[in-house]
Image: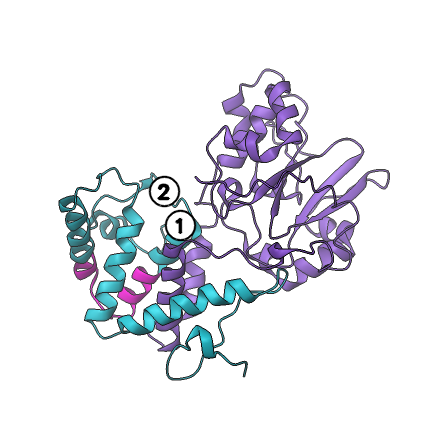
Chain colours: A cyan, B purple
Amino acid sequence: MTASSHFGPDRLAALPPLPRDEDGPVFEEPWQAQAFALAVTLSQRGHFSWTTWARTLADELAAAGARGEPDDGSRYYHHWVAALERLVVERGLGDASALAECRDAWADAYRHTPHGEPVELVSTQSHMPRASDRKRR
Amino acid sequence: MDHTHDHGHDHTHGHDHGHDHGHDHHHHDHDHQVVPDDIALRVKALESVLVEKEMVDAAALDEIVDAFENRIGPRNGAQVVARAWVDPGFRERLLADGTSAIGEFGYLGGQGEHMKVVANTSKVHNLLVCTLCSCYPWPTLGLPPVWYKSAAYRARAVIEPREVLREFGLEVPEDVEVRVWDSTAEIRYLVLPERPAGTEDMSEEELATLVTRDSMVGVATVAPPSGDGS
């Protein structure tokens, strides 16, 4: 599988210019690729159109520029994540408090997992657990 | 990148550890995982919430991320290896203190872990593994390949490394010692492969193009440019 098999050049071209080379996007850290995959997958599943995604990301980048952040691409995927969080909440795919709780639960899981064991989040069916009351099932 | 992790103690374990997937090699606070940056946690939260609500499929996400396994820091490790081949001083610094030598390239980061570089020689072949899939020197090697994360590789690399290497197409002579390095929460390893014969006239940049990810994990050697790698 090639890196670009999931999306044609047209789809990348629709986005604000992203860090890439001739073969497609490049990432500095794994979370950036994960965030990239989330946006692609949500769009493929029809939760929002690629055009909507491109516009939301552009808005986020513009807002960062308005705050005086340097537009050098170094925080491109930080803005990508912020745009993703906003769209997920706006479209009712998840709510902000669930995201915040889940973030804390992950931090907690990392703190309490011994090295050599995979870090796993113990979740419930309906909502993400609070870090303080997680139980093993 | 910040690097506030300089303990000043030199871990020289590795030759024989790894046979028990040990939890016995660190008896202090760092036994637990390093908590990732806030931004990485936010991405994990997005993924967890969306997967749990079945808005996305975890396998579909993995498939896309796996497609990029060579797209994160892809050539960084190769540049380090090529420099070590042409610059004996750098090689010496690299083997003595991988963290700061690799830092000369600006490739530190991630979770601030120590880097230890282990050199292949005519007498020693080094192989990397981790019982935990996330222990991988990704600032230099990119994302771990799927097989590196597999339970089979993680278990077998320490039990029967020669057989595992044979399955990768690498026959290690009996008189060459195989050393298996099991990553820890604090230390990530990088294999410095041997420079292939017939590359005496190549520049550092040209040499870097020969160095593969697999050779820096230790499941392959670096083939000479002619294509005859046997």
Q: CA distance from mark 2 to mark 1?
A: 7 Å
Q: Residue, x 30% and y 61% (percent of image)?
A: A39
Labels 2 and 1 positioned on one and the same chain: yes
According to the picture, the residue beneath numbered tag 1 turns out to be A3
- The x and y percentages for residue B143 are 50, 50
According to the picture, the residue beneath numbered tag 2 turns out to be A23
The chain holding disc 1 is A
A110 or B192, which is in the foreground? A110
Q: Amino acid at mark 2?
A: Asp
The chain holding disc 2 is A
Secondary-structure class at tag 2: loop
Q: Residues within 10 Å of mark 2 (few under 14, many from 20)?
A: few
Q: Is residue A3 above or below residue B133?
A: above
- The x and y percentages for residue B187 are 62, 46
Q: Residue, x 62% and y 26% (percent of image)?
A: B93
CB-based contact (under 8 Å), mark 2 and mark 1: yes
- The x and y percentages for residue B138 are 51, 46
Q: What span is colored magenta in the figure? A: A38-53
Q: Residue, x 30% and y 41% (percent of image)?
A: A74
A74 or B111, which is in the foreground? B111
Residue B122 within the magenta-colored segment of the rendering: no
Q: Residue, x 18% and y 58% (percent of image)?
A: A56
Q: Is residue B124 above or below residue A3?
A: above
Q: Residues within 10 Å of mark 1 (few under 14, many from 20)?
A: some
A86 left or right, relative to B4: left
B46 or B193, which is in the foreground? B46
Q: Is residue B189 above or below residue A118?
A: above
Q: Amino acid at mark 1?
A: Ala
B177 left or right, relative to A74: right
